[in-house]
Image (spheres, helix red, strand yellow):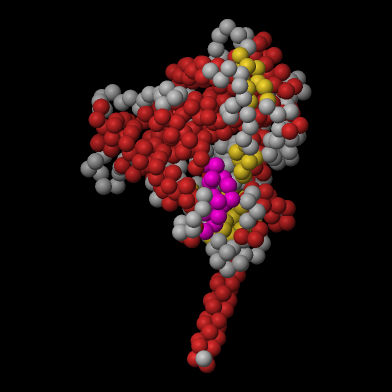
Amino acid sequence: MYCFGDFTFFLAIIVIGLFCFMGLSLLWRRRKLPPGPTPLPLLGNILQLSGGDMVTSLVKIREKYGDVFTVYLGSRPVVVVCGYNAVKEIYVDRVYDFIARGDTSTFDTTYHNYGVAYTSDVDRWKELRRFSQSTLRDFGVGKRSLEDCIVEESQCLVTELKTTKGSFVHPKQYFSKVAGNIIFSIMFGHRHEYDDAELLDVLNTISETFHIICSGWGHMLEMFPRIMQFIPGKHQEILNNMQKLIKYVKKRVEKNKETMDSNNPRDYLDAFLIKMEKDKNNPKTEYNFENLVCCTLQIFFAGVETISSTLTYALLIFLKYPDVLGKVCEEINCIIGQDRSPKMQDKNQMPFTDAVIHEMQRFIDLIPMGVARKTTRDVEFRGYFLPKDINIYPMLTTVLKDPACFLYPNEFNPKNFLDEKGEFKKNIGFMPLAAGKRNCMGEALSRMEIFLLVVTILQNFVLKAELSEGKLNLSPDVSGLGNLPKPYKIAFIPR
């Protein structure tokens, strides 16, 4: 009995000592970092960040600590940077100090530092980005040929929406199909029919995965990746679904290998495989199977989810603001009419529509926390010492809602992009998909898709909400890595 009591006392002393040591270690590491809420040993700032909406929690912390502060995701320190001026310094003014990709546990467990989007290896990123941008241009990105592809696919969407016969439907599934076919044409060389089982399975997997990543389950996985891998919950679907998508890409790679002509590449996969063959004797090449699979998945995952979520949110905003919808439809009728498909050159004559689409992207705030960066060396930033390899969160939401940039930062108002004469005006704070050298590779493609698809939908359909305007809720369903809209139903009534 006494031996057991002595052992219990000894164990308690060890545990208390361990927590004291970790507490002192935290204080030592924090001494030169920006200020922030006091973290708990091992648990970090879970008390401040566990409400299920990490974005709102970080914005609230900013109110106390300013534009640059530190939070702990578990035991991992993250420096959060807010406001246009500070974020621009990260993205543009001092780009090479902060150009490395930061830790994103929800994806790192799948990609293992391979691919173009989530690698922290700057040299790898430079080489794969150069290749990917060049290859995407070769297959139409930024060219007239891709515009024609989007216009053609938009007409397929019109045909598909007409099959709903004016009934109320969830729109996300249709926008995933059109976005999927556009990016799949570039990556894999062909489109799918909208009822293709394989296409639907891949699109549903992407949508489901991103929704969980942006939810509280994703937040917990990000804060405690090692522990959460062994705890049951919805976050396990992230890991399982990502492996399912990896297997899908590998299957597509093998399929391309069987029919590839080295002198006539058909798509991104062919171009990468040809480059792999040319570099097969180079032990330091970045053109290997792991990078091929991860680059492909990263590009088409972003290409599908960015467009489908933006369009889904955009139509909800139109339903909430029918006066804005009416003015856009008037401009479409005046400039394009009903007898031809829209073209990108039409946008220059449609200032209100252009302003509305920009304002929608700003208001939607699709990637509110940006994507994590890392310092590439020890740096001084705004009076604070940031050690090499510390994670940085450039909070895009605080740029898109910066009152120094936008007259109406917290409400939906197209005047944020209109001058006194009603003409479209650019805004320096508009960076919905980041900025600088490591911004989204597909930004030009997304701008083209959003304009052409929105205009085509409004040209062909009257939008009808299932709920009254007052019951439509524009606040996000989940808010983390992404802001995603609450589910709703809409009817597409042919004009």
Number of labelled discs?
0
Check the image and report above or below for 234 versus 305.
below
* Residue 9 falls left or right of residue 291: right
Q: Is residue 135 above or below residue 64?
A: above
Residue 140 visible in the snapshot: no
Residue that lies at the very extreme toward the left in this rendered image? 281
Residue 273 is left or right of residue 413, and the answer is left
Residue drawn at 61 percent across, 52 percent down: 80
Question: Does 110 sit left or right of 345 as displayed?
Answer: left
Quarter location, residue 428:
top right
Queried whether the magenta region covers residue 358, the answer comes back as: no
Choose top left, top right, bottom left or bottom right for residue 489: top right
Residue 278 placement (x, y as % from top left) = 25, 36
Quarter assignment of residue 43: bottom right
Q: Main secondary structure of the magenta part?
A: helix
Q: Residue furthest bottom?
A: 2
Taking the magenta stretch, the answer to whether it contains residue 223 is yes
Which quadrant: the C terminus? Answer: top right
> Magenta region: which residues?
210-224
Q: Position of residue 232 (x, y in %)?
A: 49, 55
User: Residue 275 versus residue 209: which sits nearer the camera?
Assistant: 209
Residue 27 visible (yes or no): yes
Q: Residue at x 58, y 6 (%)?
A: 339
Residue 480 place in picture, x, y as percent: 59, 46
Q: Residue at x 45, y 42 (%)?
A: 117
- Reply above or below: 45 against 212: below
- Residue 360 location (% of width, % of height): 65, 30
Residue appearing at x 26%, y 47% in the figure:
283
